Image: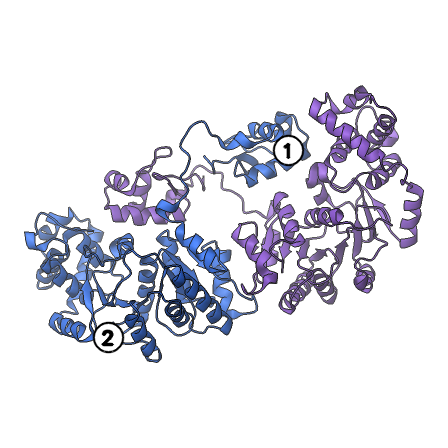
Chain colours: A blue, B purple
Amino acid sequence: MSGTSASEGPRDHAGSDSDRRARAVWSALAEPGDAVAGALVQTCGAAAALAWVTSAADTDRPDWSGLERSAGELDESLRRRVDVGVRRWAARWRSLDPERDRAAAQRSGARLVVPGDPAWPGGLDDLGALAPFALWVRGAPPTASRSVALVGARASTSYGERVTVDLAVELARRGWVVVSGGAYGIDAAAHRGALTGGGATHVVLAGGVDRAYPVGNAALLEEVVRAGGSLISEVPPGSTPTRGRFLQRNRLIAAVSHATVVVEAAWRSGAASTAHHAARLLRPVGAVPGPVTSAASAGCHRLLRDGVAVCVTDADEVVELAGNVGADLTPVPTGTDVRPTDGLDPVARRVHDGLSRRTARDAEQIAARAGTTPAQARAMLGLLELDGLARRVASGWVVSDAQE
Amino acid sequence: MSGTSASEGPRDHAGSDSDRRARAVWSALAEPGDAVAGALVQTCGAAAALAWVTSAADTDRPDWSGLERSAGELDESLRRRVDVGVRRWAARWRSLDPERDRAAAQRSGARLVVPGDPAWPGGLDDLGALAPFALWVRGAPPTASRSVALVGARASTSYGERVTVDLAVELARRGWVVVSGGAYGIDAAAHRGALTGGGATHVVLAGGVDRAYPVGNAALLEEVVRAGGSLISEVPPGSTPTRGRFLQRNRLIAAVSHATVVVEAAWRSGAASTAHHAARLLRPVGAVPGPVTSAASAGCHRLLRDGVAVCVTDADEVVELAGNVGADLTPVPTGTDVRPTDGLDPVARRVHDGLSRRTARDAEQIAARAGTTPAQARAMLGLLELDGLARRVASGWVVSDAQE
């Protein structure tokens, strides 16, 4: 993420004053989720990228060599994307006012956090080119804490809110930080529950941190900051929350959290998009089931059916889910002495030996090879499949590599 | 399943009179789920197995050669199991009365169905040695029909019963046969819903088909028979339903159905055991979620968490689930021209090319090979994993065979 390149001066390295200033500008210049800007900043560093874009915007024939010194040779399609990007960003030069943004941040008690700062949530780096340039933060950001996103529908039911509050209270009591989007319904219940449980909670906003949105949750957001949590945004103070920013905001909720749990969500919903962001980041995703007669749970059931989310029903299961990352994974045995077939009984072993890795055989053929009845072979194949050692294909059975 | 062997006379083949008589005896002699008796009958045929057991029961030194002519040489542990079995079955000689059973069947309008009969549900053969010797059936058995088991808790909630009735009505209207256990709660709602939908429904009982159990459902069971369904049992008329027989009955519900759906079930429950039987038979299993605050749904959520069941919320999803067997499976492409990596963009392809099948590499190493940034490699690895093309192991990443 450092993005330092040979062409930058010593004061341009990540976290330097010029890097901070440039990132503040980028946070206003490029729309959240602008992967071209993100890749440019990653490759050249924020300050050098900004300098090059500034010069390129002034001419119809940009000096690609200046960019290619940092980024390497660009192919035609990439040049075209950067070219389009320059024009996209240049359209915002006039409204750009870093001094105004800085003053607004100061007024609202917000500060700028950039990669390299101790307060930078490391999980954001997994977003790659889609990582935010900077965060504007009111309060204490969720850095090394164990954090879980609890998200869901604005049109929630009393069932969903009750379950959310219960989960958030329990998670907070166990030292987990609750992250959500500050919206009505499930989000608000998540923040409230975390406060009730005496924990910190973080609100990732789609607009500026000086703009309580929705207004009806203004008191709740203030309470979040007072209680040691924070309001977080990737756009400068004063920015309005737009539809696109709500969707992009969801990737930040997923990226700053160890796991994402959806409590209630309609068939199509922003909460489900947060879940998909988390899944793409390989973060664990949970969904709380509800009555199949409730439209507010349809999105959760869809996530379960699609295999995106694991079914979670209480705080224990959420903690188990969120703990299953990186270092907490059960190590895969590397010794050559242990084989998946070691525990099999002799008949199952013979049936397994009758399977091929490439050639599908049906139960009768396998039985003939293994010296069992077809029924025994069928039964054993079923058990082997449950153990991940055999796999059913269109024309019969093959050895499965699942456990190797 | 024919079990015909060289030592049997022409009148002993599967479905012959002597086979039927012997199977009727076995259904009284061996307890449901007696795999030793099942294997013996499978190997030697019902009549020959019965003749040998009769002679062996009369002596302390059974003539193994008589058995081994059909079964092949038996190892010591198998001899011991058969020996124990003979003693187990001999304990029932005295209470055995095939004439009484036949008369009781006639009185209640039940008939004996054995393997080879057109009315024999073929799905039972997948049980192998655990297949029932025969079925006693009042009404029309569920043979070639498309059938779904709807099972669940006796201690059901109004939510669970409502969902069950809705599912059963819809399934019946679409021509699916509903199978259940005739118990109070979800089972009864399943049968009632099927009748309401104008469909056939089958009750698999733990005791004799002449014994309405539970008594409170007697009128419902009669209605099932009148409406073209059936009462089914593997024990003769007059047999009492015991705890063991309830558990063994569950394997029959799973085996005669194309899919099993659990609507409500406590954390430990008979319905969950039916689901596990179905899973072992490689039949699709569904679970209907409910409020996490309802103990009656805890077993369903457990099945979802354990990956035993797929989340189903309406009749469409149940039909999709039940249709996913055998011939309805999407064929696996066999051509060599189509590779799972065909759809990848160039960067993802390069990252995939940087992976090894055996040697785990971390994102930095893969990035160096692929000529991408580590963050790009990480992001691409995430997408590749979602596509089943890369797999995370303890020390890094490897190629996944999931789609090959």
> As displayed, is residue A266 above or below residue B10?
below
Q: Which tag is nearer the camera, tag 1 or tag 2?
A: 2
x%, y% of residue B277? 65, 46
Q: Amino acid at mark 1?
A: Ala
Query: In the rendered image, which residue does mark 1 sit on?
Result: A377
Do pointers 1 and 2 mark residues of a single chain? yes
Could you tell me if the residues under marks 1 and 2 are in contact, i.e. CB atoms within 8 Å? no
The disc at residue B217 is: none
- Name the residue rendered at 58%, 57% in the picture: B300
Task: State the SS at label 2.
Answer: loop
Query: In the rendered image, which residue does mark 2 sit on?
Result: A210
Disc 1 to disc 2, how far (Cα)? 68 Å
Question: How many C-alpha atoms fall within 10 Å of the one at disc 1: few (<14), some, or many (≥20)?
Answer: many
x%, y% of residue B264? 62, 60
Mark 2 falls within which chain? A
Q: Is residue A285 visible?
A: yes
Q: Amino acid at mark 2?
A: Asp
x%, y% of residue A23? 16, 61
How many discs appear?
A: 2
Instruction: Name the quadrant of the N terminus of chain B.
Output: top right
